[in-house]
Image: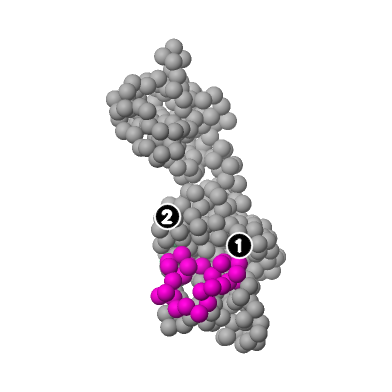
Amino acid sequence: MANIQLKAVRKSYGAVEVIKGVDLEIKKGEFMVFVGPSGCGKSTMLRLISGLEQITSGDLLFDDELVNNVVPAKRGIAMVFQSYALYPHMTVFDNMAFGMKLDKTSKQEMKDRVQKAAELLQIDHLLDRLPKQLSGGQRQRVAIGRAIVRDPRVFLFDEPLSNLDAALRVQTRLEIAKLHHDMTDVTMIYVTHDQVEAMTLADRICVLRDGLIEQVGTPSELYENPASLFVAGFIGSPQMNFLKGAIAEKHNCTTLGIRAEHIEIADAADAEWTGKVVHAEDLGSDNYLFVDIGAGDPLIVRRPGKLETPLGTELNLRPIAGHIHRFDANEKPIR
Ligand SMILES: Nc1ncnc2c1ncn2[C@@H]1O[C@H](COP(=O)(O)OP(=O)(O)OP(=O)(O)O)[C@@H](O)[C@H]1O
Ligand SMILES: [Mg+2]
């Protein structure tokens, strides 16, 4: 277990600075998720915390102890990557025990730890198999198991589920949530591109943008009170609708943001926007109507249940009171 602090952390590769001064505290036992566009520095942050990369300037502390110059093996960290490099000629058991063999752990203790981790991940019936005899999800669980048996203080995950198909992602996501629930002492930092993973797994989400933190908060804080237009557009799926020009001016802002679930169909008398349905996506439980109101991209409107609105239907719409996000010319919220 560890409390992790980053103080004014910077990282350059040659003349190019990729982490530009990050201050962040991750609490003991917390599940922190890093999100942000490709190339913003998420993997670099994990590599700095793990010690695989050296910090250029600033301080990194584990439980108030400076670890800038502590080698990776001494940091008590386990890392799980997108591609789970298992040894193909070794059984699941041997793959999981491999690191402990290097550490000269006793045979009995090795067996106990592998068994415990395997039970936690529900792969204890697979210990004698070779990786090629496993599904992708099972292989990824072996990779996670191999990390667990080393009894880490900190768990780092870099997009661990992105190679799995949709059903396996859901299942393995639940396993990871359970792991966090069972290993209450272990601090977890998790990088993902997946909105649902970020929203459901995180105690807090850290949104990175071009080497800097844009906002840190609980999933609902970021969803309900984004600190910038960037966060508003990044968190949530489908993306928040943004309206500019006269529509925004009417609400005394430069950009008006409204989420798909916060637009309702109104009577003509109290409609704020009117337009035609130009596209629709039926997800079964919900559907999304794309309504061209003559102001840039079509507005995305969520409707519960089956699709009942044919293309071309004229709709009167209005935002649900209290759910409008207003942003000024500097892309900061007006509250
Ligand atoms: N060894 C390196 N040498 C030079 N530049 C690097 C090196 N590693 C990463 N970078 C640069 O640092 C920036 C951040 O990279 P990083 O891998 O942390 O991004 P990321 O947020 O993980 O992106 P993705 O979502 O695509 O995985 C990128 O512009 C990348 O090109
Ligand atoms: Mg990355």
Q: Which residue lies furthest to the front in this view?
A: 125
Q: Which residue is drawn at 51% across and 71% down?
A: 142
The image shows residue 242 at horizontal and vertical percentages of 42, 33
Say which of 209 and 125 sits in front: 125
Q: Which residue is drawn at 69% across and 69% down?
A: 65
Against 253, residue 5 (above or below) is below
Kind of residue sitting beneath label 2: Ala
Q: Residue at x 33, y 21 (%)?
A: 314
The image shows residue 196 at horizontal and vertical percentages of 49, 49
Which residue is disc 1 drawn over?
179
- Which quadrant holds residue 55? bottom right
Label 1 element class: helix
The label number, if any, that marks residue 51 in the structure image? none
Quarter of the image containing the C terminus? Answer: top right
In magenta, the rendered stretch is 117-141
As for residue 119 lying within the magenta part, the answer is: yes
Does the closest atom of ligand 2 sit within 8 Å of the Cβ of label 1? no
Quarter of the image containing the N terminus? Answer: bottom right
Q: Which residue lies furthest to the right in this view?
A: 64
Mark 1 neighbour class, 10 Å CA radius: few under 14, some 14 to 19, many 20 or more: some
The image shows residue 98 at horizontal and vertical percentages of 54, 82
Residue 41 seen anywhere in this rendered image of the structure: no
Which residue is disc 2 drawn over?
166
As for residue 201 lying within the magenta part, the answer is: no
- Which quadrant holds residue 334? top right
Mark 2 neighbour class, 10 Å CA radius: few under 14, some 14 to 19, many 20 or more: few
Against 180, residue 68 (above or below) is below
Kind of residue sitting beneath label 1: Leu
Residue 178 seen anywhere in this rendered image of the structure: yes
Say left or right for 252 vs 283: right
Labels 2 and 1: the sequence-earlier one: 2
Label 2 element class: helix
